[in-house]
Amino acid sequence: METGEPSTAYRTCPLCEATCGLEIKLEGERITSIRGDADDVFSHGFICPKGSALRALHEDPDRVRTPLIREGDGFRAASWDEAFALIDAGLAPILAEDRNGVGVYLGNPNAHNLSNLLYARVLIRALASSNVYSASTVDQFPKQMSSALMFGTGTSVPIPDIDRTDHLLVLGANPLASNGSLMTAPDMRGRLRALRARGGKLVVIDPRRTRTAREADEHHFIRPGTDALLLFALVATLFEEDLADPGERIGALCTGLDEIGELAKPFTPEAVAPVTGIEAAQIRRMARELAAAPTAAVYGRIGTCTQEFGALASWLVDVVNILTGNLDREGGAMFPLAAAGASNASGAPGRGRGARFGRFSSRARGLGELFGELPVACLAEEIDTPGEGRIRALITISGNPVLSTPNSERLAAAVAELDFMVSLDVYVNETTRHADVILPAPSPLHRGHYDLALYQFAVRNVANYSPPVLPPDPELPDEGVTLLRLSGVAFGMGPDADVAALDAGVARTLIGRELQTAGSLIAGREADDVMSALEPRVGPERLLDLMLRSGPYGDGFGAHTDGVALSLAALEAAPHGLDLGPLAPRLPDVLRTAGGAIELTPELLVADVPRLHEALARTPADGPVLIGRRHLRSNNSWMHNLPVLVKGKSRCTLHVHPDDATRYELTDGALARLRSRTGTVEAEVEVTDEVMPGVVSLPHGWGHSAPDTQMTVATQHAGTNSNVLSDELLIDAVSGNAVLNGIPVQLAPAG
Ligand SMILES: Nc1nc2c(c(=O)[nH]1)N[C@H]1C(S)=C(S)[C@@H](COP(=O)(O)OP(=O)(O)OC[C@H]3O[C@@H](n4cnc5c(=O)[nH]c(N)nc54)[C@H](O)[C@@H]3O)O[C@H]1N2
Ligand SMILES: Nc1nc2c(c(=O)[nH]1)N[C@H]1C(S)=C(S)[C@@H](COP(=O)(O)OP(=O)(O)OC[C@H]3O[C@@H](n4cnc5c(=O)[nH]c(N)nc54)[C@H](O)[C@@H]3O)O[C@H]1N2
Ligand code: SF4
Ligand SMILES: [Mo]
């Protein structure tokens, strides 16, 4: 390597949910090119501009490469020991007094990081604090909640069988920009074109005519926040026209079939049309076409989750999938079977413990727990509201909540008042600039990769492990090591806990749990034998090997020799990944509900229907509402420091329909002032009929103008932080998820 020898490495891109295979050419340790891996079993060479920007990220001079310790208004480089001594001194006394005094926020890149997926939960257990927050409550928890209520686990999300469906109805997603979410599918453009080329139909429901909408056969503007009404009208039509038919196999598994028909009755197409903005005749036709298509799938994403009726809309997407006979059949909405970590493939098949929510509540507002977390919309108030149980110290892990979560200004002010803050991150940005200690993370090229989370949602069953492209950087320990060391602090072991011992403990716990699991492939083995069979692996690779080998395709440590007989070694021998086949029907085995049924009408969701009923009677607001959008060359808040991605004209513009431009006296290129209950921002206007009248759109993740950050390029392309306008009090009542789409704003020319 040292000699500058040319070599080629294969690695899955960790930047979005598409999991594209990359072909990385090197000379010694210097990257010479990053391209799509033509032989990748899933992405077949597809890549987007962010994938090749991994090189710019790796080389970014602003990337944090040593621990940083606050000194005055800035930071100074420090050793790991010094940093951990300070962390222990900062956290231990607070933890000794009140576990809830330390909060933690987990950001999006954790979902793409094997170590963090495996070891952040160790830290969370060690902290034993109720104050656990993540990007999931500005994102997909409403969908995971409805899935858990209907099917029994939060990862039992029906995924459109995109490669075989005849009809795809997309609500509130723009996979041509986002590359897909809760639908891991590299090359969405290719897949959607193939759908149409085989005679299938693509329908998009979005307040904007997106890139995806432009590829579609049909696009309908919808008023933000009204998808649940539209979906209920589809349900009402299916019943009214005698088209509701889950099929014999699925019907026999469902409870609540009659009830759902009754619940839908008031939401006729005629009743919802004026509120949604979609004509009744169109809604009826959509319902008929969904029912008539040989196979069909309904898919909703950010636009259906981060809105006022996020849980109801997420639920009704699957109700329509069920009532049109498309659940769990080829070409419909199906359950992937991931090779590792699939909670709906573990234990006795067909029933389980079901889902429970609200096991505890937030202190100030009483918002209910979900999946062990509290809604991030209440993070600021948990810091700035005095009294017992207040968050006094915060740990952020791959997160930039100051830009990404509602009411940024309140959160920024709250975070600045913390007694102590530590961030595990790669930049000094809007959030981490408030930290007392920043712990750096290695570049993706220095670590192994396996998409433990995203394969739960993939449109094909695949498994791909990438070894580190470059040897570990001795100055930058794997994040698993850092997280275990932080866990040591949280466990009260001080700043120098024996990380190897903690890691072995984690492996033993996981083995113990697996051995206790009914029907486990490795049932009856001795824990010690399993532990030695995993040698000499340690860290995330040891845990992954265990999960693969005891998973649904596993070799069971020799118990299974036929079939794929998966192990980490098998994946290491397959640098382009292993294709485990198209999605296959999994009902009833996939179910983990307490009664072993598909719960079509979970109580928690049914209880929210009256709120939706009230929305029917509403006259649409006269003023504009704000929604977001994504761009292919951007990734939430953190890739704006890479010149290759931010060059060209500003992407952080306010999309305004020509009618609204006239009405509010705004001109293209001029600055508009936007005001909401929580704040005021200015943004450059882009007049376009791609957005519907009465709706304006501003992307999130911008606004890099805070002082004392260290992002030279991003600062020059600062843009506007849209989350100054998102209101922490606007939440989906069921899930507590933030409303980031459909925020009432006032609009005027700036100045
Ligand atoms: N208005 C509005 N707001 C939104 C959304 C929206 O649609 N509209 N979308 C929401 C959604 S879906 C999400 S997921 C959130 C995202 O919100 P967050 O997850 O809070 O923020 P990110 O912008 O993804 O920031 C990621 C952070 O991780 C750091 N990082 C990057 N790579 C690594 C790494 O390898 N290790 C470590 N330790 N750190 C790393 C970056 O420097 C950055 O600080 O934003 C949400 N906010
Ligand atoms: N390039 C890029 N890719 C990304 C990301 C990124 O920031 N940049 N972020 C990643 C993350 S963290 C996520 S969660 C995914 C998100 O993946 P997607 O959900 O596909 O992301 P968006 O492009 O935000 O698409 C949401 C769409 O919902 C529309 N919308 C807004 N409000 C409503 C509404 O009330 N109803 C309906 N029907 N539509 C509405 C918006 O106009 C937008 O087109 O993308 C991931 N991929
Ligand atoms: S689509 Fe996503 S996974 Fe594929 S190269 Fe782009 S950022 Fe990476
Ligand atoms: Mo997200």
Image (cartoon, rainbow, N blue to C red):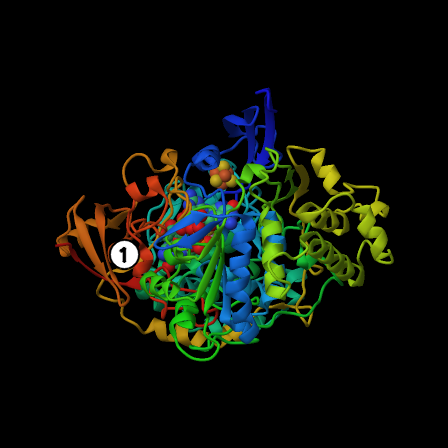
Which residue is painted at 67% across and 59% down in the image? 344
Location of residue 256 with respect to 640 vertically, above or below: below
Task: Find residue 505 and report its image quarter.
Answer: bottom right
Location of residue 115 with respect to 375 vertically, above or below: above
Of residues 624 and 527, which is closer to you in this image?
527
Of residues 481 and 213, which is closer to you in this image?
481
Which residue is painted at 14% across and 54% down in the image? 749
Residue 351: image x %, image y %? 71, 67
Of residues 594 and 747, which is closer to you in this image?
747
For mark 1, what is the residue? 695
Report whether 585 appears left or right of 601: right
Mark 1, secondary structure of its residue:
strand
* Count of numbered circles in the view: 1
Residue 92: image x %, image y %? 55, 67
Amino acid type for the residue under numbered disc 1: Val
Task: Find residue 405 and report its image quarter.
Answer: bottom left
Q: Quadrant of the C terminus?
A: bottom left
Q: Quadrant of the N terminus?
A: top right
Residue 285: tell me if it is visible: no
Point out the residue furthest to the bottom here: 387
Tell me: is circle 1 under 8 Å from ligand 2. Answer: no
Of residues 489 and 538, which is closer to you in this image?
489
Category of crowding for the residue at label 1, using alpha-carbon neighbours closer than 10 angstroms: few (below 14), some (14–19), many (at least 20): many
Residue 421: tell me if it is visible: yes
Location of residue 706 with respect to 413 vertically, above or below: above
Which residue is painted at 67% across and 63% down in the image? 591
Residue 664: image x %, image y %? 15, 56
Report whether 684 appears left or right of 486: left
Which residue is painted at 74% across and 60% down in the image? 509
